[in-house]
Structure formats: structure tokens, C-alpha cells
Image (cartoon, grey):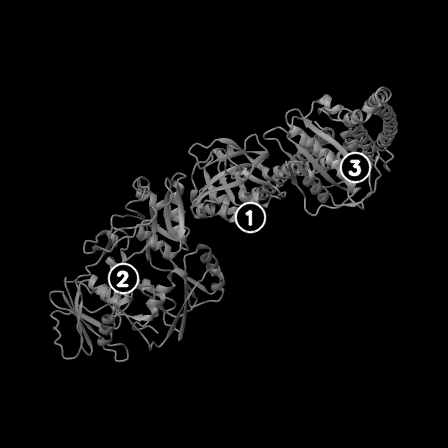
Amino acid sequence: MSFRARLLVAFGVAVLVPLLIFAAGVRREMDRRLTAEYRARVDAAVEVVRAQLDRESADIAGRLGALATALPRDNRFRLALQADPSARRYLLDVAGDAMGLSGLALLEIQDSAGRVLSSGHFRNAYDRLEAALPRAFVGGRGPVLVRARTATGALLALARLDSLTVAGQHLTVTGGTAAEGFVGRLPRARDLDVALALPGDSSARSSGAAVGAVPLPFLDLTRSSPALESASLVVTGSPTALESLRRSVTSWSLLAAAATALLALGLAAWLSGRVSRPLAALADKTAAIDLDRLDQDFATDRTDEIGALSHLLGAMTERLRLGAARLREAERRVAMGDLARQVNHDIKNGLAPIRHVLRHLDEVARADPAALAGVLAERKGTLDSSLAYLDTLARNYAGLSPALRREPCDVNAVVEEVVRASIGGVVKTSLEPDLPAAAADRVVLRRILENLVGNAADSVAGGASGSATISTESLSGEGVRTVRVTVADTGPGMSRAQLDRAFDDFFTTKEGGTGLGLSIVRRLVLDLGGTLRIETEPGAGTRAIVELPVAGETPR
Amino acid sequence: MTYRRGAMGVGAMLVFGCGHPAPSPVAPEPPAPPSPSSACLLGTSGVPAPDTLTVVVPQSDSAAVAAANDFDTLIRLDCDGRPLPGLASSWTRDSTGTTWTFVLPDSQAPGAIDVASAWNSSDTASAILSLSGVRDAVPDERRLVIRLEQPAESVPVIFADHELGVRHHTSPRTIVVRSTDGRDVRDLVDRSPDVLVTEDPDVLDYASKRPGTVLTPLPWDRVYVLLLAPEGRPPRELITSDSTTFRAQLARDAVRSEARPAQPPYWWSDLRGCADSGTRVPMETEASGQVSIGYSAGDDAARSLAERIVALGDSSWFARGLAAHDFETALRGGAMDAYILPLPIRSLVPCRDAMWPAGAVLVPLVETRRTAILRQNGPALVVGGDGSFRPDATPGGP
């Protein structure tokens, strides 16, 4: 896992986990508070219903009380109770008239046995026995929800009972208001409703869940055997509103968490990128460092740890550069020593035959002067050969230190010259058109390429399918353009050990080679401000890659 | 299901025109009673009626009363059902009782040809004549000779039906019929109309205590029946238990207006002469499990009776008031189980008035009557059997 990925994960975990915990906590707290507030509103609604019920009950009781006071003073009513036929109809109508005056919806006067003497809501229900009605109020002080019969159907009323004694008869007066009207007049909260819930009736809860209730005794007189049951005024609340609020809180919490997480991840990505990108750049620069390329610039304005690291790497590179210079100087001195020994050896080797010939001629001149000419002629070849050897030797050594002229150079043209002059025409070319001119000495570049091409041609000589290719291309990188010349062959390649010594002077794998070719080439390339590297693999061939700065570009 | 109707296939051949030989009467009808029953006389004898007579009746009766006052018929019936001269001053019959000759002497009033022409131009009149077995009617200048399919001992009362009348145009007096129109009738009493007809006991109680007002009960004119639909779930066991006591209790307690138990005979007891015809359009019945008893909204007596019957039943019974048109539609379509139906105590055309579905059972309940509220020393009036009010024109009258 990369440093950047680790940074992202760590940042994400460090931000997301607390954030999710916070969101869950907020959601839970909001839910708790919403539920508590809702519960408080429900309790308030129940209290309102209870208070309204008490008020309605008191109102009904007041009207019944007034009626119970007025009836004994009504002479016609009193006469009717004493079976006066002329007052019979008055008795039947008195409840209806009183009901109309009192604004009640239900009014019934019954005798002590429960027989209906007069009914306001069902005038012609006289003489019916409804003993269950007064019994329903026995022991209770509150209202009773009564479902009473009328001619046109059932009437649901909130009823109270009062009693009176007239002409020695104990009577009950039951009166009430329409329950639907009472329920309809009840004040309602925004998302709370109130409905009557009767035994076996689930319609009251259809509009929502029952969240509170005020119990109410219930008597259904439409049944054949009425009995006191339990009904209630149910406060119903649609769970939709609360659930919607909860969902909204959850959604917003999740949204906030997601937005924060995204922001955190973005910030983490930016920060990790900001941290890792310079490190990656440092790593790239560090990876490009070797003894031939110690020109990496680690200069930076940063004052943080990365800046410190850059300074350290720059200092290290500088030390390496100095060390490399010293190493090269040491190498040069060693090479010069080696060269001096080699020159000494070579000159001695070249002079030894001459010395032998001259000693032979001296011996002949002293012993047989006449034969001197013949011996000279006989030994002249040896002299010439030695002189040629020395001449060659001198030219080779002279090539170790050419004079440089760095000027715009058409690399493709030099390549073509070298290829034309190569033996056998085995070298193929792949040249980039419009190749920019390189800053190089044309003669030096030709020597470099002649050496490399010669090595390539030698490596494939004798092979039936071997080939050598020279290609050019331009490169751009880090603001510097270079011209690359690649000389590749499909020859036997080199081992790692051979490659490590490839640039050493006098190291050669060719029979009759001087071992100076690649060493000279490397020095020439470095003198031109370029680079040389060898890519090789035993059995797969070798690629010599020369990169030269483009003319006009600042050399590294 | 069919409706009971008259023999519509027997068309009345009405022939009129001068020169047609009119059959000569064989035996003259005894002279018609010269004056209505005293029970039908209202007001103060000898006090002449004003040119315009205002009669206020309940809204449900206004159309019928107005029609009765707007049309002249060959004969009229007094409130007890006895025939009185109308357009015809007298009538005779032949010996077979199938040919009746009506004499229309008044040259100012519509003549025999006018009457025959009115009958001929009215589909309703033709249907009634057909239902009543009138074969033809032959008018001449002063007589209208009518032949019947079946002999009649007394003058056929169908000729008092206003559907067989002629609208009079030159009445010396104008009778304005007004409806109570949903107002408090006591306000109308305060205005002292010539005649105010009501059955509301509260109004009557108020009027009785108001000086200068006279209350005169009118004849028993309608009978309320419980009509059990043929396919309904009627409370038969309730009706058949003790009908006499039941009716008496209903009349005493259930109906707030003046009522008495229904008393036979009933005109619908024998409808053998009427045929079933027509097609019933079945209607959806009320919710299952419930017994519905319908009545015409606005008819307090009908409502009271329906409610009492419901009160005697269980909670599956209920009463339902319907607008007049809806009530008639429900009755014909059988939408309810039972109905409280007000019927005239006498029917001039039984086959027409028996409009209930065949197979229905009629249980008579109570008879009711209304009361006329008159001004003290008001004009003398005659109450007709059709609910009309006319100035008393009997000899010796005003």
C-alpha cells in the first residue's frame, strides 16, 4: 500500500468514525427529543379532551338540572303522570319540547321501572322498557356514551342522568348532546385527531395510531340486551408526521456525514498528494542518480521536512559529485599510469624489433659489410612493420584526447555518413525526421558512432541472422530536450561482469581489440555533455544509448 | 310485478255533435238533494261570501284543493260523499241503469258539448272513463247522454272527479288557494284568512284561544295504511296481533293530529274490476338486515305512524322520510319494506287510486281529519268531498 493510500485510509478512518458516531448520537438525541415532545403534545391533547368532556358533562348536567327543577312545577305534566287522558299527548310531547328548548339531542323521561314516559329523540318510543339506561349511571358520576334508537337510526350521545320525584313518582331524566358534534367541536392539534372508539369498532383508528385515550362508559341501546361496555375518546396521531421528521433528521444527518466524509477524503487526498508528490519527485530524482548523472537538482524553497530531505539529498548528491570527480581523477591517474606503462610497453615492443634489426645490421656491417645491403633489404620489412605499428600506436594514443568544438550538429547526417562508411552495409537505420540539432563536435560524434557501430558490426559478424541498427530520436523531459542515438545489435551481448568492466581502459572481449574503444567513447560523450549507457543481456544483444543535449539548450 | 289498473282496452267511445239520436231516458233519477249535508256547511249562514275568498291549506293539499276549485264537474260531492248538482242541474237514468242523461241548463256555464269535448281531448279523462266502464257520451245542446257498460243504481261518482271537469272561466268569485308553505301556521292565523285548514294541534290550540276565530272540524277524509311490500320484510306479526287495540293506541298516542282507528269498509277491499297492467321497475332495497318503513316527508301523521311502528320493532327497523316524488317512485319500485300511505277515505276512481304493487298488503291504521279555522261571522261555505271550498248557494242561503 502506498504512502498516499495509507494516508487516505488513516485520514478517512480518523474522520469518518468520529463523524458517524457523532451523526448517530445526534440522530438518537433528536429522536429522543422529538418523541418526548410528541408525547407531551399527546398528553396535552388528552388533557384537553378530558377537560372538554368534563365541561360538556357539566353543561348537560346543568340543563338536566334545570329541567328536573321545571318539570315538577308543570301542572299538565303532573296531571299526565296521574293518568289524566287529556294530558296524555302533552306527556308524550314534553320531552321533545324540552329537548328543543334545551338544545339537547337526546332526552328521555322514564319511570322508576325504566319505562319510557316521554322521549324527545324518539317521540313514539313511549312505553318501551329501557331499564338499562338509568342503570348505566348507577355508581358513576360522569357521562355515559349512549347509542340510542331513533326512528331513523341510531343516535350516539354523550349523556347524563338526573332524577326527580313528581306526584309521588320517582322519575329519571336522561339527556345528552350528539357525540359526533362534541367530537367535532374538540380542538385539535396539527397532527393529532380525536375520534370515538366504540367496542368492536376499528374505524376510529383508521386515520392513525391511537396515542392517547380518555375512557368512557358505553351503553348500546340498539342491542337486544344492552350492557355497559367500555368506549373511549381516542387521540390518534398519524405516525407519518413523526416518522417523516425522524426520516428527515436521519437523512440530513447522513447527508451531513456523507458531505463531511467526502470533504474529509478530498482534503485527505489533497494533503496526501501535497505530501507524497514531492516525495515521489525526490524519489524519481534519487532514482536517476548514478555516477554518470549527478546533475540532479534538489534545490527547494520548502522549509519543512521535505525541504530538509531535499537539502540532504542535494548535499549528498554534491558529495557524490565531488567523490565522482575525485574518483574520475583517480581513475584518470590510474589510467594515465596504465597508459604510460602501456605506452612504455608498446613502444618497447615496437622498438624491440628495430633494435634487433639495427643490432643485426651492426653485426653485419662489422662482419660482412658487403652483405649489409642485402640484409637491410631482407630486414626492411621488419623495420617497416615496427614503424607502422608505432605509427598506429601513436595515432591511437592521439585519439585519447581530441580537441572539442561544441556546435549545432546534424546527428542524422553524421549517422548516415557513418553507416555509409561501415563495412558490408549490415547496419540499418531508423532516423527521426526533423531531428533537432545536437550540441556536439561533428568529428567527435563521428568517432563515437564509428566506435559503437564498429562494435555492433563486430558483434554480429559471422552470425547469419544478426543485425545492427542505429536509430535517432528526440526526447523531452524536465524542461530539457535531448537527442538520443541508439546503436543496437543482436549479437551475443555481455554478462553482468563484462558490463561492469565495459568502460575500463584496455578491457576488450574481442580478439585483437585494444580495449580502449568504449572507454574513449564514454569520455568523448561526457566531454560533449551527454550520457552513455549500455543495456545488454547475454544472448539477446546490446544497446548502446547516447543522449546529447539539443543545441541551444542549457546543458545539465 | 304489475300495477293494478282499469280495463284500458275498453275504450270509451265519446260521440258528440248535433243531430245524433240521443237515447231517451226510461226512468228518471229521483231528484238530486238540493243541499249539502249540514256537516259540510261552514261559516255563518246568511253571510255572503266576498268576491275573493282566501283558503290556506297545508302544502301537501294545495295542488288538489286548487284543482278542485278550478274545475267544474257534472256533479259534485259534498263532504259526506253525497252527490250535488254541478254543471248538471239534474240527471236521470233509464230502466236498465246503463244510460244516464245529465241536463246542463245554464247557458253561462260550459255546456254538454264543452264537457264532451274536454273529455275527448284529455288522455287522462279518457283513461278514467275507460277504467270506470263508460262506453260513450253523446252531447246535445243541453244534455249529455252517457252509456255505461254496467248498470248503476245511483249516479256514478266519477263524474265528480276534477279530471273530468271543465275549467271555469267566468266564476263570479275568485277562490285563492294558498299553501302554508313551511311557515309557522300561527302567523297565518294571525292574518285571519277566510279559511285555514290544518291538523297541527299546536296551531289549533293557539287558534282556539284567539278571539274572533271559530274552529270547525272537517269530515274524516283520509285513512293511513301500512302498506307491506310484496317482497319486503314487513313487520306482519306486529300488525296482526291485536289490530283493534293497536289502531286505537295509534290514534290516541302516536298521531299528534286528530285521529281515530280506521273503520271499514275500505274502498280498496274489492278491486276485482281492476286489471293488473304496467311493469314494475325493480329498485335496490335498503341495506340488508334492516327493515325500512317509508313515508312522505312533510306528512306528520305518516311520520308519527312510521316512527311508532319502528319503536315497536327492534333496532333493525327504521323509518325514512322521502320527498313526494321519491316516495311514489320507491312505492312503485319496491325499494323499501313497508310504507305509511295516506289514502282518501273515498275513491272516485278506485282503479286509478290503487297505485300500489300487486301483492302488497294494506293494513288500515288510523283515519284523520283536519280542522278549518274560520273568522267568526265569516261567509257561509260548503266543503266539497274533493276538498274544495265554495260559497253556500243552497236555497235560503246567501
Front in this rendered view, residue B57 or A427: A427
Residue B59 is situated, as x and y percent measured from the top left of the image, at 41, 61
The image quarter in which residue B376 lies:
bottom left
Q: Are marks 3 and 1 in contact (CB under 8 Å)?
A: no
Residue B97 is situated, as x and y percent measured from the top left of the image, at 14, 65
* Structural crowding at the residue carrying mark 2, measured as other residues with C-alpha within 10 Å and reported as few (<14), some (14–19) or many (≥20): some
Q: Which quarter of the rendering shows the C terminus of chain B?
A: bottom left
> Which secondary structure lies at badge 2?
loop
Q: Earlier in the sequence, mark 3 or mark 1?
A: 1
* Structural crowding at the residue carrying mark 1, measured as other residues with C-alpha within 10 Å and reported as few (<14), some (14–19) or many (≥20): few
Residue at 69% across / 24% down in the picture?
A: A494
For residue A103, the mark is 1
C-alpha separation, residue under disc 2 versus residue under disc 1: 47 Å
Residue holding disc 2? B81
Q: Nearer the viewer, mark 3 or mark 1?
A: 3
- Of the residues shown, which amino acid type is indicated by label 1? Gly
For residue B397, the mark is none
Horizontally, is B69 left or right of A394 in the view? left
C-alpha separation, residue under disc 3 versus residue under disc 2: 148 Å
Residue holding disc 3? A530
Residue at 50% across / 33% down in the picture?
A: A199
